[in-house]
Image (cartoon, grey):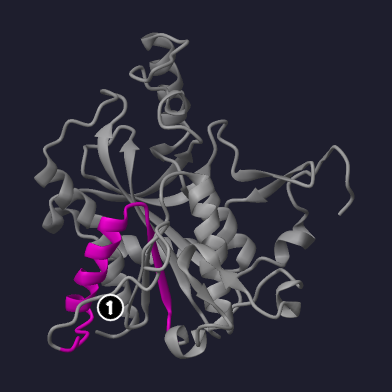
Amino acid sequence: MSSGNSFHAVKTEEELSLYIPQEGLVQLRNPHINGMDEDVLYHIALSNKSNNLTEMFQDVKFVCFGGSPTRMHKFAEYLVEELKIKIPAGLTVTNIAHGSDRYVLYKVGPVISVSHGMGIPSLSIIFHEILKLIHHAGCSDVIFFRLGTSGGLGLEPGSVVITEESVDGLLRPYMELSTLGMILQHPSKLDQDVARDLVSLANSEEDGYVTIIGKTMCTLDFYEGQARLDGAFCDYNEADKMAYLSRVHKRGIRNIEMESLCFAAYCYRAGIRGAVVCVTLLDRLKGDQITTPHDIMEEWQSRPQKLVAAYIKRKLNI
């Protein structure tokens, strides 16, 4: 890679062929890691020297990311019941990353439940460290999920969207990353087989809500980046907002959030099968603010968790 100010276009077909998901052990695309005496996973308070990561995590087959620490703790507790994990009396699921206050990390059988915070920068940090964790642990054939919330487009609030393709605010299917003074473009591809398997587990009539596969727009901002009128700054009017949201809706966008682009790009780059499953908290074609009562919101937020848990149970023959 050359230095200086330059632009690196979307990767060639030859380069992209390197990123096809591979069966077997999780490999890192960084030759420097193997030469390090110790790899400190600072933000989750673990290390491949201070901790026996193989003993702790080698059986992991699924990693579930979600923004909220509280939500991922509840998901871990939910998995204990669904996967029939026996926890000794008097004990409970434990935050393995308790030595750090940045993220929470729980392990329930072959599943890691980890928080990623809000936005691409926060997700990027934990993704790097989780990928290194499962590499050091010798994990194989691992599937990643992002379980989240989003704003819907043309959907009833409470609907679930499984991301077919993630795009940025300009509807481009790649994440731009400034590296050594250059802008690199990493394609944001997700595993379509996993998406189809997930939607096959949904039953809209029985569930009482719709689950669809659709495109997701990922933005760098919650307010102006998502065409809201209720931020501290706004340099456009309602007609501008509606024209933009209507345009992206016609292009197949069904929800908007702030992490899927990075998640998809990193899964593809790592050769990891991945899926993004988000519930919609409102229809952005009808408003900007979330006013749904807390108890209803809690139930909605459990919907992606239930779907992914059903997928995991099927894979584990439970």
The residue at 58%/83% (across/down) is 49
Instruction: Give the magenta part as a residue range.
Output: 59-88
Q: Quadrant of residue 216?
A: top left
Tell me if I can see residue 189 in this picture: no
- Image quarter hosting the C terminus: bottom left
Percent coordinates x, y for residue 218 in the rendering:
48, 40
Tell me if I can see residue 248 in this picture: yes
Identified by mark 1, the residue type is Lys
Q: Is residue 2 magenta?
A: no
In this picture, residue 131 sits left or right of residue 224: right
Q: Quadrant of residue 111?
A: bottom left
The residue at 43%/63% (across/down) is 100
- Image quarter hosting the N terminus: bottom right
In this picture, residue 251 sits left or right of residue 108: right
Q: In front: 293, or 167?
A: 293
Q: Is residue 71 magenta?
A: yes
Task: Answer above or below: position of 241 versus 109.
Answer: above
Q: In front: 318, or 102?
A: 102
Residue tagged 1: 313
Percent coordinates x, y for residue 248 in the rendering:
46, 29
Percent coordinates x, y for residue 154 in the rendering:
30, 32
Question: Label 1: few (<14), some or many (≥20) within 10 Å?
Answer: some
Helix, strand or loop status at disc 1: helix
Task: Answer above or below: position of 247 versus 19.
Answer: above
Task: Answer above or below: position of 257 versus 40.
Answer: above
> What is the count of numbered marks?
1
Q: In front: 271, or 254?
A: 271
Q: In front: 261, or 128?
A: 128
Percent coordinates x, y for residue 3 in the rendering:
88, 47
